[in-house]
Amino acid sequence: MMRSSLFLFLLVWSLFSCQPKPVDQHLEQIPKENLLEVLLEGNLRFAEDHPIHPDQTLERLRDLNQGQHPVAAIISCSDSRVPPELVFDQGLGDLFVIRNAGNIVSDYEIGSVEYAVEVLGVPLVIVMGHTNCGAIHAFADYDHDHSHVYPEYIQKIIDYINAEEEEKAIPRNIPNFLEKAIEANILHGVHELKKNIPHADSLIAHNQLRIVGALYDMETGKVRLVKDE
């Protein structure tokens, strides 16, 4: 009887000891030069199915009632499978998220990021696309066949993507056109933010702001950075 009780105790202890421990440090306490690395570490926890779900308590919610201090602004697709807080294993008040179909970066998105940078002091901005993006699929289909008729506002999204210089630069006959189109759309967003956010060049030069592109793989759950060629 004693042996079975001891075995049960050890089994329960081993199960609980293997669980990831929540971190005490809030994201806003992380040095800004380490923020991207910390977010990618959170994504790795998510992709490996070991999230710790930080800052998701009622106490955290009540603290945030006094004000928000997000550390990163993320423009991502509205796709229901791409929630940035879950993808990066973060919680309430950590991320300033702007979402739309196709992670488009136009006037409204630029204005939202400008608010995040100028008013909230966000030092990191991520434009995050994802694999198998429906908006880019629609653009690619329309690019190859103009006969398909889309509803008016879906067509506006397609037309916006179609007008991006980064998309125009991609050869249409390459076998991985869709993948390249997704990356080009991400880079377009990065370029638009760098060009239009007030004093972006100076902020970036003085390490006060970082604007990067990222791609979320919906099969693996992993995020990788997308860089200019």
Image (cartoon, rainbow, N blue to C red):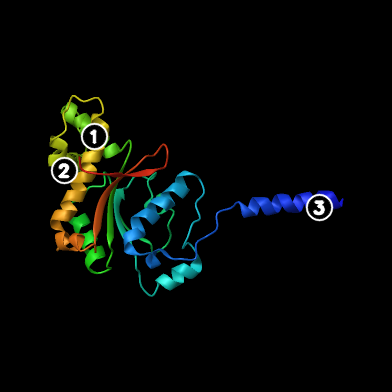
Q: How far apart are marks 3 and 2 (CA)?
A: 66 Å
First along the sequence among labels 3 and 2? 3
Q: How crowded is mark 2: few (under 14 residues within 10 Å), some or many (20 or more)?
A: few
Task: Find disc 3 in the rendering and name its residue.
Answer: 5
Please provide percent x and percent y for residue 48: 49, 44
Q: How far apart are marks 1 and 3 (CA)?
A: 59 Å
Q: At 27% across and 45% down in the image, what residue appears? A: 101
Please provide percent x and percent y for residue 16: 64, 54
Q: Is mark 3 on a helix, strand or loop?
A: helix
The quarter of the picture where residue 210 lies is: bottom left
Tell me whether the residue at label 1 lies in contact with that at label 3, contact meaning CB atoms closer than 8 angstroms. Answer: no
Q: Is mark 1 on a helix, strand or loop?
A: helix
Q: In this view, does 156 lie to the left or right of 17?
A: left
- Check disc 2 and give the amino acid type: Tyr
Residue 141 drawn above or below residue 68: above
Task: Find disc 2 in the rendering and name its residue.
Answer: 160
Task: Answer whether residue 100 is visible to the viewer in this image.
Answer: no
Q: How far apart are marks 2 and 1 (CA)?
A: 17 Å
Q: Which of marks 3 and 2 is in front?
A: 3
Task: Find disc 1 in the rendering and name its residue.
Answer: 180
